[in-house]
Amino acid sequence: MKKVCILFAFLLCSATVADAFVFTYAPTCARCKSIGARYCGYGTLRTKGVSCDGQTTINSCADCKRRLGRCSSSFITECFL
């Protein structure tokens, strides 16, 4: 029973951390830097844009929409600025 409780607690914590992580994409590296991204990853500009790696400003779909972005949330959460 103790192992089940520990496993359940671990799963709850993992889900909370996963919900707070949003993959963010922008049309330019400068736009990524404006939201606090450390690096600009590569991406295809026609589909997603460049990835804003290390950003901490956008943590949910609500944050994305406040920045006038489009949010997609399924298994992973993505924000397109």
Image: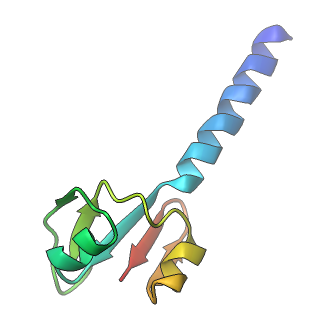
54, 51: nearer the viewer: 54
Reply above or below: 9 against 44: above
**On the rendered image, what quadrant is the C terminus found in?**
bottom left
Q: Position of residue 17 (x, y in %)?
A: 57, 44
Q: Position of residue 80 (x, y in %)?
A: 37, 80
Kindly identify the residue that appears in the image at 48 percent across and 54 percent down. Answer: 21
Q: Position of residue 27 (x, y in %)?
A: 21, 84
36, 1: nearer the viewer: 36
**On the rendered image, what quadrant is the N terminus found in?**
top right
Q: Is residue 27 left or right of residue 80?
A: left
Kindly identify the residue that appears in the image at 63 percent across and 44 percent down. Answer: 15
Q: Quadrant of residue 56?
A: bottom left
Reply above or below: 35 against 17: below
Q: Is residue 17 left or right of residue 78?
A: right
In this view, the residue farthest toward the top is 2
**Tally of marks:** 0
The colour scheme is: rainbow
Q: Position of residue 48 (x, y in %)?
A: 27, 78
